[in-house]
Image (tube, rainbow, N blue to C red):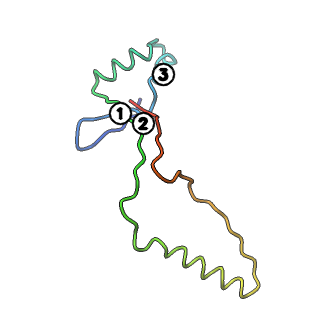
Amino acid sequence: MKGETAGDPCSAVKWTRKSLRRVSAAMSERGSSISHTSVRRQLKTAGFSLRANRKRLPTRESPHRDEQFKKIEALKRRFLRQGLPVISVDAKKRELMGEFKNAGRTW
């Protein structure tokens, strides 16, 4: 599971990014047939813990947050004054706003 494990550097807590069934399937591909319940038991014995996904909300806004938008707005106005076209492209990562529950869990 190299590359699929993670952990807290300040403690001995570690986890894997794969689900129990995916670990079981990967083991089967390598010739070791093992059920997902046995994978859970082995991970627990090896010191892995169950982790639940949770959304982290930003604690405070950066005072420089709006600088890029002000710069883009100034460029847009300059282009429009010169009669040049302006195209808006939304290329940011989309995220849900607010406290939405994500029931996903990983070992």
Q: Find residue 49 and report its horizontal and vertical position in percent.
A: 31, 30
For the residue carrying disc 2, how many other residues have a C-alpha within 10 Å: few (<14), some (14-19), or many (20+)? few
Q: In the current view of this chain or complex, which residue is farthest to the bottom?
A: 81
Quick check: 60 above or below 99? below
Residue plotted at (71% across, 70% down):
87
Front residue (pair 71, 66): 66
Residue 9 lies in what quarter of the image?
Answer: top left
Name the residue type under label 2: Gly
Which of the two labelled residues, at mark 3 and mark 2, occupies the earlier sequence position?
Answer: 2
Mark 3 and mark 2: Cα distance apart in space = 17 Å
In this rendering, position of residue 17 left or right of residue 74: left
Which residue is identified by label 2? 3
In space, the residues marked 3 and 1 are separated at their CA atoms by 15 Å
Which residue matches tag 3?
21
Image location (x, y in percent) of residue 53: 42, 39
Q: Secondary structure at mark 1?
A: strand
Tell me the element at label 3.
Answer: helix
Q: Quadrant location of residue 42?
A: top left
Up/down of 19 relative to 76, above or below: above
Of the residues shown, which amino acid type is indicated by label 1? Trp
Quick one: SS at disc 2?
Answer: loop
The disc, 1 or 2, on the residue closer to the chain's N-terminal end is 2
What crowding class fits label 1: few (fewer than 14 Cα within 10 Å), some (14-19), or many (20 or more)?
Answer: some
The residue that label 1 is drawn on is: 15
> 97 or 15: which is nearer to us?
97
Q: Farthest residue to the front: give it.
A: 99
Q: Nearer the viewer, mark 3 or mark 2?
A: 3
Q: Are marks 3 and 2 in contact (CB under 8 Å)?
A: no
Q: CA distance from mark 1 to mark 2?
A: 11 Å
Q: Residue at x 40, y 50 (%)?
A: 56
